[in-house]
Image: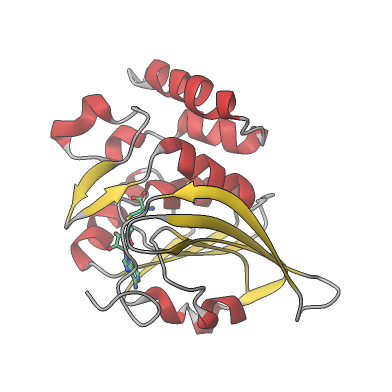
Amino acid sequence: MDRYKKQRMRMVETQIRARSISDTRVLKVMETVPRHLFVDEGLIDQAYNDNPLPIGEHQTISQPYIVALMTEALELKGRERVLEIGTGSGYQTAILAKLADRVFSIERVASLATRARKILDRLNCYNVAIRVGDGSYGWREEAPFDAIIITAATPQIPSFLAEQLAPGGRFVVPVGSRDVQTLYKLTRSADNPSEMKKEDLGGVRFVSLIGESGWKS
Ligand code: SAH
């Protein structure tokens, strides 16, 4: 019996369901993925708290509610190919792996990618491919994707990524300054692929995307 199960159930109830996340697949998966494995040992007691936490290399694991909000917006049914930029701890990656067919995740910092890979293997997330590099360019060989998620702040929507979104696909991305961003959901029209619908999902604070589509350092 997983001793963190109770904390996880409470997290979903009070932080996620209470804030109107209703996709039952998302709720179920967040009740099962062991978030405490993705944080440093010294922070395990805080793993299910209502906030982001440091994961080293000046990066953070996102707040559980933000993970739920972004995941729900991707509208995953189980057969999708998903591109993620900013693997970080790998927690969001694990959630995506349980909800979609395949996940392609790009992380700039090699040590984070290595650590994430180990935990994902331990959780049998073998449908995840991780690449180290600048995610600004996407993953051309594996495109198009049914869903794309960027878990770092970007000053503009990276054009390479938008091009890799399939007709009918969803793209969730925080756009703004280094301090504060707006979370956008873009949906490419299935009938007219040159058309993109844009929805505002609210204000967020992410660490910066560093690279071609982001900041220089
Ligand atoms: N979803 C992750 C978020 C990690 S923070 C989690 O919850 O753990 C954002 C991550 O984006 C960091 O790990 C950072 O190194 C990475 N990142 C920043 N710029 C990047 C880029 N251009 N390409 C790929 N990853 C990048």
Q: In the current view of this chain or complex, which residue is farthest to the right?
A: 191
Q: In the current view of this chain or complex, which residue is farthest to the left?
A: 42
Q: Nearer the viewer, residue 26 or 1?
A: 26
Picture quadrant where residue 22 is located: top right
Rendering colour mode: secondary structure
Q: Nearer the viewer, residue 70 or 30?
A: 70
Q: Quadrant of the N terminus?
A: top left
Q: Is residue 212 above or below residue 50?
A: below
Q: Is residue 119 above or below residue 101?
A: above
Q: Nearer the viewer, residue 130 or 134?
A: 134
Q: Is residue 132 left or right of residue 57?
A: right
- The residue drawn where x is 42% and y is 71% is 155
- The residue drawn where x is 18% and y is 56% is 58
Instruction: Give the x, y percent position of residue 213.
Output: 40, 79
Instruction: Give the x, y percent position of residue 112.
Output: 23, 59
Q: Is residue 158 above or below residue 72?
A: below
Q: Is residue 213 left or right of residue 44?
A: right
Q: Is residue 66 above or below residue 97?
A: above
- The residue drawn where x is 63% and y is 50% is 73
Instruction: Give the x, y percent position of residue 205.
Output: 38, 50
- The residue drawn where x is 32% and y is 63% is 208
Count the marks: how many? 0
Picture quadrant where residue 6 is located: top left
Q: Is residue 191 left or right of residue 185?
A: right
Q: Quadrant of the C terminus?
A: bottom left
Name the quarter showing ligand 1. Answer: bottom left
